[in-house]
Amino acid sequence: MPTPPPIPVLPASPAASPAARARDPRPGLSGLDTGALAAWIAERGAPAFRARQVSDHLWSGRPGGVDALRTLPAELRAALDASFRVDTLPETLVREADGGLTEKALHHLDDGRTIESVLMRYPARGPRRERATICISSQAGCAVGCPFCATGELGFWRDLEVAEIVDQARFWRGRLAPEGRRVTNIVFMGMGEPFLNTERVLQAAAILTDPAAFGLGARHVTISTSGVVPGIAALTAFGSQVTLAVSLHAARPALRDLLVPLNRRWPVAEVVEAATGYAEATGRRVTYEIVMIDGINDTPADAEATATLLRGRLAHVNLIPMNPVAHTPWQPSPRERIDAFAETLRRVGIDTTIRRNRGIEIGAACGQLAAELAGAPAPAAVARRRELLVRESAAALLDAGSTGTPA
């Protein structure tokens, strides 16, 4: 695997989190690539087919730890159990919504931290086949601090290990298997900024797309970033055909400073240039995500700025109504304003999709379930946060109006 360039690390913010516990020193088995597992088996004098037996169990979706590998000799099972964890997600809470079409999982890690993943089922419609898309996390918490995101309010705890990322996909494969269904798409859009954990995210992506491991096609995997330019460069060098998604949210720099604080480090023009480099290197269009917030980033000026920024690029835009979050005063944009925004982009040849929210009643947006179970912040703290956002958004809108659109 190519070695990605070093990524600057954002400082961790205080986190309202469960009390941390000592971590299990054993690495997760699913974090090993197939070659490393085969080497471990060979070092113990076991025949090569034992590695295939372990892999078959690991990637089949069947439940159970080492004890379930009854085809292995007891001595090898004991060595495996002493060296690795078969599952790095020891406990999971699942909630359902949308008549069972959406499910959200809150996974407890071995140190007491929690992360989230989501399953979204899409029934077959016309020529489109049935799909099962999962959204997985790359960090426990997030240090980026986007003000419309519940994860940002929780703060940052730690990066996830490779196996902790991969095991989220294994969890959903196991949940779907009894139905005769399978995971068809994976998106890194859960908790955390993937490109602040770049090396492990790319290792996880390699395992998830390895035909001898999880085995999903690279074009069915999407990695989403708030705009970490070195991470986009690392993905470009990685040479995969995964989809790159950029959380754009605003094309006007002053407004994006508020909505995506990383914009102060990597300005939006630099982010789009790096993403365009990825598109040119791979021939794959980049997806740009915009959470539509009533009266904040959904104005005609915002639509024109977005059209100017992305015109002529290999790009697709997803417009997503904001999920209401307790600590913000903001609400989702009305549908007619989203439609008008989309029409502005389509007029200049930018493919645009309006997405509908899923699982609102179970807090399916990133971080909402973890925030709920961590305990609601004090009303006074919520009021102060709302007041601050009102002032900051008013100032950002004024500044954005005076500075115009990016070049």
Image (cartoon, grey):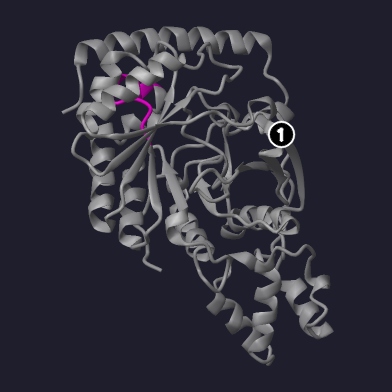
Q: Residue 100, percent across and down?
A: 71, 38
Name the residue located 55 percent from the left edge and 74 percent from the top edge: 212
Residue 61, above or below 52: above
Q: Quadrant of residue 375?
A: top right
Residue 141 visible in the current orientation = yes
Label 1 element class:
helix
**In this rendering, position of residue 198 left or right of residue 277:** right
The range drawn in magenta is 247-258
Q: Residue 129, percent across and down?
A: 53, 51
Q: Residue 95, percent across and down?
A: 74, 36
Name the residue located 69 percent from the left edge and 29 percent from the top edge: 362
**In this rendering, position of residue 318 left or right of residue 312:** right
Residue at the left extreme, as displayed: 407
Whether residue 108 is in magenta: the answer is no
Residue at the front extreme, as displayed: 126
Which residue is labeled 1 in the image? 99
Q: Quadrant of the N terminus?
A: bottom left
Q: Quadrant of the C terminus?
A: top left
Q: Residue 185, percent across and down?
A: 53, 52
Residue 123, above or below 30: above
Name the residue located 47 percent from the left edge and 50 percent from the top edge: 197
Amino acid marked by disc 1: Gly
Bin the neighbour count of mark 1 within 10 Å (Cα to Cα): few under 14, some 14-19, many 20 and up. Answer: few
Residue 306 visible in the current orientation = no
Residue 278, above or below 50: above
Looking at this view, is 203 or 177 the one in front? 177
